[in-house]
Amino acid sequence: MTNKEKPNVIVFFTDQQRWDTTGIHGNPLDLTPHFDQMAKTGTDVHSSFTCQPVCGPARSSMQTGLYATSTGCYRNEIPLSEQTNTLAHYFKDAGYKTAYIGKWHLAERDPVPEGQRGGYDYWLGSNTLEFTSDAYDTVLYDNDCQSVKLPGYRVDALTDEAIRYIDRNQDDPFFMFLSFLEPHHQNHSENYPPPNVYKYRYMNEWIPSDLAALGGVTHHHISGYYGMVKRLDEALGRLMDALKSLQMDENTIVLFTSDHGNHFKTRNGEYKRSCHESSIRVPTAFIGPGFVGGGQIQELVSLIDLPPTLLDAAGIKVPNTMQGRSILPLLNGRKEEWPQEVFIQISESQVSRAIRTKRWKYAVTAPDKDGWRDACSDHYVEEFLYDLEADPYELENLIGYESHLEVSNELRECLKQRIVEAGEPEPVIQTAPIRSAGENGQRRVSIEDYRKFISNNTT
């Protein structure tokens, strides 16, 4: 490819955004008209999941195409090795300018030392943006480690800077990673500060069924959270408008995704770090060359598949070392070899592993391991089994029920295989204590039911 033929590539990366904040996933509040339009005219990755539901580990996977245990960043506060190749290195080697704007969370301190910036040329970032800034007090650090205070609400401040970068770099291909903090909570005040105009706009509005059933801190924070999502979508619209006004929209690939979701303290003592849909499922869509009219992808796609997809779409050879795979074959109807499950590693709150198929969620935990100290385990105990077809909000844990033992047995072997494929030792998985159906009267789910469901969803 010549420079003029190479597409620009932009990653629009949000933090802690649930998939069901978007209209394309059924949210009725019209929070995301720009994302919804992007998904409808481009490619909607409808079933998209993080591979690690916590900030730093997920970001290490997004930068490298490797699982967090392979990058070494299996929890927060572990810097990404300076010897690790990132998307910035691969794009730079292919003749691209590279830029990073926003939250990084893969270094040991702020300002981020040059060697810990993942190889990006242009830098205006903060390792922990939630601590160096506030909603209306945006402070980042430039290439010279000098603090830069940007005007406006934080989402707008970062978007303004991204648009300025695009305007300055129209003549050469660039790869830009735009990383927001929103809709993550503001740590020091434990709240979700929206722009002032939306401070009370979403009070007493629609709440997803899992949050309505389980409570947590949902009612205290959901209004601000929605206001942050709304402003992010407006920022996406501004970015797309800038590309169109500069006649760059037809030669720029834009990926929208998030590092993980948010369960509002309904599943454990904080906001993520669990196997549940609220923690792991995120909105994801592509637009631009190769993705226009791509339709809705129904296969299960992991965050770890997004880095190779970006390289593939830009015509850059995907390294054999990447553990994810490009989704471009799915756009061309080649689905035969695509995995029927996504694999999730969970750290910090516990050492856990899970797989999510189109119907089932199966998770195990290591009771004798510390989630902060230990990256993995060779011994796990069954913890969760959910039938997502009958129970999409994961309100009834079926693990151990006699009626579902055959399903658990099948999923256990599948999980062990995925653990080994990720480069971890093959574990022993201890089965959960047997529970009878009792008064619940669950029907028996046979392995034939399980395999029939898999077969029906692969043809």
Image (spheres, rainbow, N blue to C red):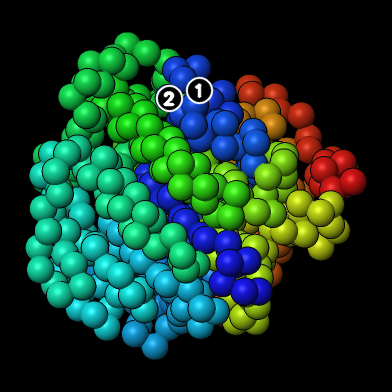
- Residue 444 position in % (x across, y down): 78, 35
Which image quadrant: the N terminus? bottom right
Q: Which residue sits at x=60%, y=49%?
A: 250
> Mark 2: which secondary structure?
loop
Locate residue 146: give its quadrant.
Answer: bottom left
**Residue type highlighted by circle 2:** Leu
Q: Disc 2 and disc 1: Cα gap in Å?
A: 8 Å
Which residue: 82% across, 43% down? 457
Q: Is residue 218 visible?
A: no
- Residue furthest bottom in the image: 83
Please name the residue that numbered disc 1 is placed on.
27
Query: Disc 1 residue type?
Result: Asn
Residue 12 point in image, percent of width and height: 43, 50
Q: Quadrant of residue 397?
A: top right
Residue 172 placed where, x, y %?
A: 47, 68
Q: Which mark is residue 31?
A: 2
Q: Is residue 25 above or below residue 274?
A: above
Residue at coordinates 10% horizontally, 53% vertically from top-left? 149
Which corner quadrant of the image does residue 358 belong to?
Answer: top right
Residue toward you, 275 or 156:
156
Q: Is residue 241 left or right of residue 219?
A: right
Local packing at callout 2 (Cα closer than 10 Å; few below 14, some 14-19, many 20+) is many
For the residues labelled 2 and 1, say whether their Cβ atoms are less than 8 Å apart. Answer: yes
Instruction: Report the residue at 30% width, 53% height from top.
Output: 164
Left or right for 51, reference 419 = left
- Pick the residue in front: 278 or 252: 252
Q: Residues within 10 Å of mark 1 (few under 14, many from 20)?
A: some
Q: Can the viewer see residue 123?
A: yes
Q: Callout 1: helix, strand or loop?
A: loop
